[in-house]
């Protein structure tokens, strides 16, 4: 099928993740922004997200700005929606980086209703949620949870509050009673925020009204999801979740429209392996509790550590560690019989290190039981990413049954205890990086895709075979 056929009569597309985040939403936001959209909007989360795009060979990681900002110069409109939580310093830094690369943000709109991540939110998050060792859930430490908590408790600071010192003072006074553990001087915070607020002011709008106008004008609107369905506060593995609803429902609400107004929701799925960062159950994890413990050490087991530990040759280019992702030592790990080491091999082959925190991502086989659940919420249309990582693996598996459970459950304790049964597929040696035709994929991979569609009720629409937009198969 062609992209034209897929998007026929489609005015609104959403890219959401059907797993625990980091599935390649950024890549597909870029794909649809470059090929299709007029307006690109994010509706949930904040700078806990790390969305990677590779345009003309250059990698960029966005935390707050939608990936479509790359096409600002071509007149595309990018929106930070009402459902987001915004760290002003992080936003101003991201804008400055773009401008430093001679790119523009002229058509950027920031919702006046979005909530502001305040310094006391970050402190609270770092103190209470970030460390797995001290009983936290392994948050990104960006202040996300406390900011959303204040929003729900009706003591949050909104973007529109930033422009009246009087309002800001009164609202902060009310809020900081809840932050006795992180004493702040209101006037110091106001002074800190003032220059940042001034910089973003030209972009602040009633984006809900703008969005309704765009839909009326027939503009093509792309929603860029953040995080993933299994991290959703509503549908995820609570309490090991983020604090927004990152399903299609929350994503649409976060830009001021209803999920029913979205013509095509595409749920992104890593295949045949998946990842999770931070704490919480992961039934198909390679290495199980050993891997969770090892990854909970965070940066102590970062990319550099693993490259050295497993003697993978690498070089440093502009602060980035560059290595052959298909190095034979990596595939010795993937093809060994010990699942903990297999998991490390998959992490190295897939370059699975947090785009936001640099933490090692836990790795495991794609879980079809969880995916079937996600399809029930985000709908049947799927994008598969990263199968090219597996070239050279002797075999791969898909999780198909939780012993003792009939279907997926959000109950973390049950998920921790369940044993997963798998369906095994033969591996392949063919290099599929960059392939654009479905029939060119190896038989065993196509068999696995057909099996997955049958099992979950999903329909694969696009398959990614590399980090750049052009590395895409429209099925
Ligand atoms: P996001 O948070 O969903 O946008 O995903 P991340 O950017 O955190 O992580 C996805 C990573 O996979 C990024 O490094 C992408 O450049 C990369 N990526 C995306 N799709 C593919 C693919 O099909 N193959 C390969 N090898 N890498 C991909
Ligand atoms: P993108 O958009 C993967 C995880 C954190 C932690 C939990 C709560 O790049 O896919 P938070 O800081 O949100 O309170 O942390 O959620 N998490 C993500 N994991 N990708 C993300 O975003 C994530 N955003 C949050 O690791 O387990
Ligand atoms: Mg990410």
Image (cartoon, grey):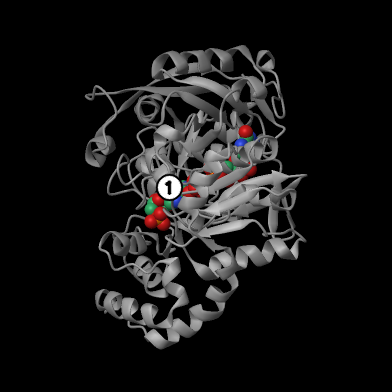
The front one of 416 and 384 is 384
* Residue displayed at 40% across by 31% down: 378
Q: Quadrant of residue 101?
A: bottom right
Instruction: Report the side of 239 relative to 210 (left or right).
Output: left
The location of residue 238, given as percent across then percent down, is 28, 45
Number of numbered discs visible in the structure rendering:
1
The residue under the point 36% across, 30% down is 377
415 and 246: which is toward the camera: 246
Q: Secondary structure at mark 1?
A: loop
Quadrant for the N terminus, please.
Answer: top right
Q: Nearer the viewer, residue 281 or 240?
A: 240
Which residue: 42% across, 60% down? Answer: 113
> From the viewer's perspective, is residue 306 above or below residue 262?
below
The residue under label 1 is 256
User: Residue at image x 53%, y 74%?
Assistant: 197
Mark 1 C-beta closer than 8 Å to ligand 2: no
Side (left or right) of 28 relative to 130: right
Residue 412, horizontal then vertical, whole percent: 26, 41
Q: Quadrant of the C terminus?
A: top right
Task: Determine if residue 257 is in view.
Answer: yes
Q: Where is residue 273 drawn, in percent x and y?
A: 50, 31
Q: Is residue 139 visible?
A: no
Q: Position of residue 301 (x, y in %)?
A: 51, 54
Seen from the viewer's position, the closer of residues 70 and 346 is 70
Task: Give the vertical position of 346 relative to 473 (above or below).
Answer: below
């Amino acid at each position: 099928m062609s992209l034209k056929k897929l998007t026929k009569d489609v005015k609104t597309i959403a890219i959401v993740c059907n797993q625990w985040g980091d599935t390649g939403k950024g890549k597909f936001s870029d794909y649809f922004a470059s090929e299709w959209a007029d307006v690109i909007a994010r509706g949930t989360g904040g700078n806990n997200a790390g969305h990677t795009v590779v345009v003309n060979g250059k990698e960029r990681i966005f935390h707050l700005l939608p990936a479509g900002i790359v096409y600002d110069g071509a007149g595309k409109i990018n929106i930070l929606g009402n459902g987001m939580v915004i760290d002003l310093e992080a936003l101003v830094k991201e804008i400055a980086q773009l401008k430093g690369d001679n790119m523009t943000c002229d058509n950027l709109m920031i919702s006046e209703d979005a909530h502001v991540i305040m310094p006391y939110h970050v402190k609270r998050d770092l103190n209470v949620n970030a460390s797995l060792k001290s009983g936290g859930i392994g948050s990104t430490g960006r202040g996300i949870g406390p900011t959303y908590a204040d929003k729900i408790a009706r003591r949050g600071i909104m973007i529109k509050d930033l422009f009246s010192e009087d309002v800001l003072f009164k609202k902060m006074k009310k809020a900081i009673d809840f932050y006795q553990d992180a004493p702040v001087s209101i006037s110091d915070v106001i002074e800190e925020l003032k220059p940042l607020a001034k910089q973003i002011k030209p972009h602040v709008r009633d984006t809900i009204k703008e969005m309704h106008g765009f839909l009326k004008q027939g503009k093509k609107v792309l929603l860029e999801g953040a995080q993933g369905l299994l991290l959703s506060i509503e549908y995820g593995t609570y309490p090991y979740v983020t604090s927004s609803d990152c399903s299609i429902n929350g994503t649409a609400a976060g830009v001021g429209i209803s999920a029913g107004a979205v013509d095509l929701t595409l749920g992104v799925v890593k295949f045949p392996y998946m990842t999770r960062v931070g704490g919480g159950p992961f039934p198909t994890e390679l290495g199980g509790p050993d891997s969770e413990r090892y990854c909970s050490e965070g940066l102590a087991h970062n990319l550099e550590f693993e490259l050295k530990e497993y003697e993978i040759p690498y070089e440093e280019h502009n602060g980035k560690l560059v290595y052959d992702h298909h190095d034979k030592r990596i595939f010795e790990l993937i093809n060994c019989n010990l699942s903990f080491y297999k998991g490390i091999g998959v992490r190295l082959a897939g370059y699975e290190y947090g785009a936001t925190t640099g933490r090692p991502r836990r790795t495991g086989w794609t879980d079809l039981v969880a995916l079937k659940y996600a399809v029930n919420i985000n709908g049947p249309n799927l994008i598969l990413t990263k199968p090219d990582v597996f070239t050279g693996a002797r075999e791969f598996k898909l999780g198909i049954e939780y012993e003792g459970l009939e279907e997926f459950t959000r109950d973390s304790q049950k998920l921790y205890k369940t044993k997963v049964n798998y369906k095994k597929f033969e591996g392949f040696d063919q290099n599929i990086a960059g392939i654009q035709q479905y029939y060119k994929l190896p038989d065993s991979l196509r068999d696995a895709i057909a099996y997955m569609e049958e099992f979950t009720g999903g329909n694969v629409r696009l398959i990614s075979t590399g980090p750049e937009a052009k590395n895409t198969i429209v099925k």
